[in-house]
Image (cartoon, rainbow, N blue to C red):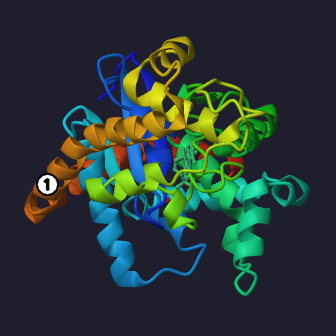
Amino acid sequence: METNKKTMLSGIQPSGDLHLGNYLGAIKNWGGRSEDYDCFYFMADLHAITVRQNPADLRRRTLTQLATYIACGLDPEKNTLFIQSHVRQHAELGWVLNCYTMFGELSRMTQFKDKSRKNADNINGGLFTYPSLMAADILLYQPDFVPVGADQKQHVELCRNIVQRFNGVYGDVFKMPEFYSTKEGARVMCLTEPSNKMSKSAPEGCVFLLEKPEDIARKFKRAVTDSDTERCVRYAPEEKPGVSNLMNIYAAVTGKTMDEIEREFDGKGYGAFKPAVGDAVIELLRPIREETERILADKAYLESVYKNGAERAGYVAEKTLRKVYKKVGFIPR
Ligand code: TYM
């Protein structure tokens, strides 16, 4: 188990069906690294209940998410895939780190402000202290990198502040983690309102990973482009946010540069460009959807994956938690 490899860790809340933003912002950067990294990826179900969830939906989404991770190429033999609530050390370290996170810091978190607005009747303590639990998720595994979309950068920075504060008192307990992201995928915007990030709360502007090809095609055809007169495919995020978002998606999916994309659609206009982006996304997602459905049918296999994952994750997490308990002055049982 012990290696000299670097470590990567990330998670996604099973609070909605996975979408293209989750894929391009996070999952895409997780794969193919297991030769060089010890990789830990999890379903953040403890985080999901900061917003009220239907229990049956939460269970279904958690398993579907696991199947999708595998379908996206994360081999459970080479990556530790687990369910957050199966590794109790997350909640335990989360409590300790709460005591090293400042009220002022938590109050400044954009996600907290956003979610409080959207769930005004349920602004609970968990929603407020969410970033301390996220810091615990990260620090239990001492990762070098945390691959997430740009919207999570603020939380990773808060985690880094916690490391500094904690290590400042107790010595070198936690490794300082780095935020990791790629330019094209970091912020996938809503197809119908390109000033907002793509999110499940605006389903017509959001492409879900397991969605039918005809629905994906429709969403891209209806994607908002810009009301400029030139109508040409040119990368200009400020001036042309709609087209630039589609270009980012196309670049992230095909690996083409912005120059190549501009040349490809030179003189063709938005009418040719939008369906081409849709087709590229459909082809990207087709094997993921088919493979997810196949894996999801094998419940015994999924169960063996998450049981093994919890065991491997728990082993690493316990080592860190013990060290922390000792440092803060708890008596070992
Ligand atoms: P969550 O569940 O909201 O999103 C999961 C991942 O998807 C990325 N993402 C996006 N990236 C680009 N464009 C978008 N439109 C878009 N929407 C979502 C997010 O940046 C994230 O990487 N707090 C985390 C979950 C979490 C976590 C952790 C992550 C809990 N503990 C520990 C890393 C490490 C969250 O709410 O992500």
Dividing the picture into quarters, in which one does residue 43 lie? bottom left
322 over 44 or under it: above or below: above
Classify residue 319 as left or right of residue 240: left
User: Label 1: which residue?
Assistant: 295
Instruction: Find residue 286 and report its horizontal and vertical position in percent.
Output: 22, 45
The residue sitting at 36% across, 40% down in the picture is 281
Mark 1: secondary structure: helix
Q: Position of residue 325 (x, y in %)?
A: 61, 50
Residue 200 seen in the figure: no
What type is the residue that disc 1 sits on? Ile
Which quarter of the image is occupied by the N terminus? top left
Looking at the image, the residue that sits furthest to the right is: 104
Q: Look at the picture and state if 139 lies above or below 183.
A: below
Image location (x, y in percent) of residue 282:
30, 43
Asked if residue 206 is positioned above or below residue 152 in the image, the reply reads below
Q: Between 223 and 47, which is closer to the camera in this rendering? A: 223
Closest to the observer: 101 or 116? 116
Give the residue at x 57% y 29%: 181
Residue at image coords 38%, 42%: 278
Residue 255: give x, y in percent of width and height.
41, 19
The residue lying furthest to the bottom in this view is 121
